[in-house]
Image: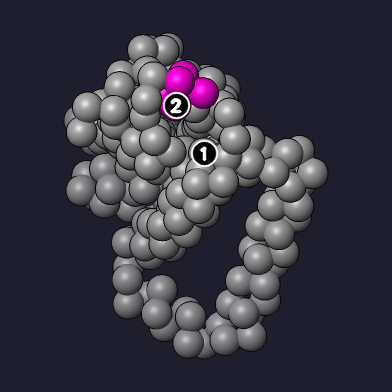
Amino acid sequence: MKYPLRSFRLYMALRTHSIYVAPLMLAAVLALTMLAGLITGIVTGFPLPQEVASTFTGLGMLVSVLIGFFISSAALAVNRTFATVLAFGGTRRDFWVGSSMGFAVTALIAATCGTILLGLEHLTDGWMIGLPVFATPVLGDGHPVVTFVAIFAYSMAALFTGAAFGTIFRAFGATAVTGAIVAAVLLLAAAVALFVWQREFTMDFIRSLGAWAPTVGVSAFAVVCLAVSYGANQRATV
């Protein structure tokens, strides 16, 4: 376990990315959404009418910001520390396990901060203006347990996606990364087509999951990215 812990410490050493940025991003999204809510409320009045507040739940700003940053952060992290771990006697498996441990810590920090902010949102009745920022459908409609698991799942999916792209780049080069992105888009298009083709079955299944539906889908995607990143990691070169 010594070498995976070295990889873990290397990842955590860059605290800006591994610890601090997730809370700062959540706070920034909250501030920007509140600013938009305040501007809207000047016209509609406070607290925001239900039909107006519901438009904010569909923005997906929180999820998109987290995913975008974590993908780039993980891609940089795996390329920054890979050679160092192997130079000090670690194996590719040690590097992957240690990095995965670091990803889990980052995702836990994001999930914990997001759940705390959701609690504050409930206590203040939507930040005192009736504004839902964390109580959104993609995060469980305000259920704290679902919100915690959802943010953790979204974060892990994004981090392993970035790790997969980063290791594919190291193993096969930039052309392979482009091919991987194209393949991912095609797979997503195929999934959407399958959803439309079997919409009655898929809608029944989604309704049976309730608030957990987005989290289950993202968790499955995270597992796929985990496997891809591990496979590419075994082919990566220093």
State which quarter of the image contains the N terminus: top left
Which disc is residue 130 wearing? Answer: none
Q: Which residue is identified by label 2?
A: 86
Query: Observer-nearest residue: 185 or 102?
Result: 102
**Residue in the picture at 62% in, 79% down:** 194
Foreground label between 2 and 1: 2
| Point 28% across, 48% down: residue | 149
Q: Is residue 217 above or below residue 49?
A: below
Q: Residue at coordinates 37% horizontally, 25% vertically from top-left?
A: 89
Q: How many marks?
A: 2
Instruction: Label 1: state its secondary structure.
Output: helix
Q: Is residue 23 visible?
A: no
The answer to which of 54 and 59 lies nearer the viewer is 59
The kind of residue tagged 2 is Leu
Main secondary-structure element of the magenta-colored stretch: helix
Q: Would you place residue 93 above or below residue 187 in this image? A: above
100 left or right, relative to 33:
left
What range is drawn magenta here?
Answer: 83-87
Residue 32 lies, in percent from the top left, at: 52, 21
Residue at numbered disc 1: 163
Which amino acid, mark 1?
A: Ala
Spot the residue most to the right: 175
